[in-house]
Amino acid sequence: MELVENGEMQWLPTPVVAEAYYGVATVRSTTTEQELRNRLLGYPRIEVDDEIARRAGELLAAADDRAGSNAGVGANDGYIAAMADVLDDAVLTNNVDDFERLGVPVETY
């Protein structure tokens, strides 16, 4: 609510769309697919394009290098982090560890 009240732009990365539908399809939830679709309609999307894919690869590789092995961060989080990096914005998440490993600013809720 605070973000809305402050007029801050809230982007919806397309990998988050996939994660949301996965949750509705696999978790015993009272949220229906139609309700999810309606909730997502109000957010502008940012797509995975060549620039985002390139930046995601760089962020994932840097995280692995810092860890000295596989940092354990999934590709979807790499795409989301790349979108935040390209937009010069923070990732709003409760999954702080993966995004800190990727070196992007994080805000929690």
Image: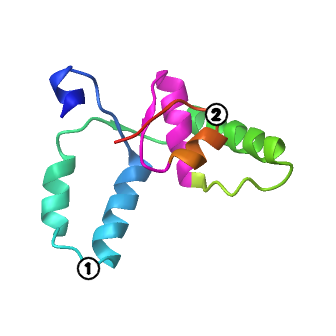
Which amino acid type is marked by label 2? Gly
Q: Nearer the viewer, residue 12 or 101?
A: 101
- Please identify the dominant SS of the magenta region: helix
Judge left or right: residue 70 versus residue 79.
right
The residue under label 1 is 28
Marker disc for residue 39: none
Marked residue nearer the N-terminal end (1 or 2): 1
Could you classify mark 2 by the number of other residues whose Cα lies within 10 Å: few (under 14), some (14-19), or many (20 or more)? some
Is 77 part of what is drawn in magenta?
A: yes
> Residue 9: where, in percent of width, then height?
28, 25
Name the amino acid, label 1: Arg
Q: Which residue is mark 2?
A: 103
- Asked whether residue 49 appears in the rendered view, the answer is no
Q: Is residue 100 above or below residue 21?
A: above
Q: Quadrant of the C terminus?
A: top left
Count of numbered marks:
2
Name the one closer to the observer, 31 or 100: 100
Residue 55: % across, % down = 64, 34
Residue at x 64%, y 54% (from the top left corner) = 73
At which x and y percent is residue 71?
Answer: 73, 53
> Considering the numbered disc 1 on the image, is that residue within a helix, a strand or a loop?
loop
Report whether residue 31 is seen.
Answer: yes
Is residue 81 highlighted in magenta? yes
Which element carries disc 2, helix, strand or loop? Answer: loop
* 54 on left or right of 69: left
Query: CA gap, disc 1 to disc 2?
Result: 33 Å
Q: Quadrant of residue 4?
A: top left
Which residue is pictured at 57% across the width and 42% down the height? 99
Quadrant where the N terminus is found in the figure? top left
Report the span colored magenta: 76-95
